[in-house]
Image: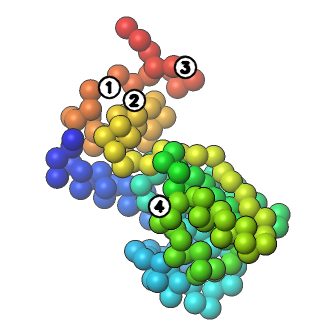
Amino acid sequence: MLGAGPAAALRGELVSRARRWAAGVAPGRAFEATSSFMAAAALRGHDGPVLLIADDVPALDRAHATTALEDLRHGLDVVFAPSTDGSPFLLALNGPHPELFDLLGEGFAVLAAAAADRGGGIGMLRSERRLVTPADARALAADPLAPEELVRHLRHAVDVRRATNPGSLLDRP
């Protein structure tokens, strides 16, 4: 849909946004791991909450972290933020639990069952759309609240009219 160059640029912007998010949420303590093994190794000796995120969610913002951490402070063990495809884009844990890291690719139902088996409380945040398919790209391009730094990568490839009033349905001719 986008072509190799624009797709790489968009992917780079998503990764940059996720890195800025992590650095803002956990200054000096954020890290990037590309596997559950790397995440577990990086968290060895860590004591305290852990937030794991997917980097392909355009709507990821500080409110997700604030809400998840508040839920953990209120005694929940695990907080999920599911994407519209059912996979979690944020997993907040009351501490490092590497046994859950290996299940990240299994989807919400498997992760929720494993978290429930641990015996603690489970919370859930609102769902957000991932940017994976052409339909996701069209939806992002049409969203009047979508981050401009992402939408600019889609303009040449997606012919969608954006709403002028963020509180209304998409304007129609």
Residue that numbered label 2 is attached to:
142
Residue 67 lies, with reference to residue 169, above or below; the image says below
Q: Which is more N-terminal, label 3 or label 4?
A: 4
Colour theme: rainbow
Q: Label 1 near label 4: C-beta < 8 Å?
A: no
Residue that numbered label 4 is attached to:
54
Q: CA distance from mark 2 to mark 3?
A: 12 Å
Q: CA distance from mark 1 to mark 3?
A: 16 Å
What amino acid is at disc 3? Answer: Ser
Residue 138 lies, with reference to residue 105, above or below; the image says above
- Count the marks: how many? 4
Q: Secondary structure at mark 2?
A: helix
What amino acid is at disc 2? Answer: Ala
Q: Which is more N-terminal, label 3 or label 1?
A: 1
Q: Which mark is residue 4?
A: none
Q: Residue at x 43, y 42 (%)?
A: 147
Residue 162 lies, with reference to residue 110, above or below; the image says above
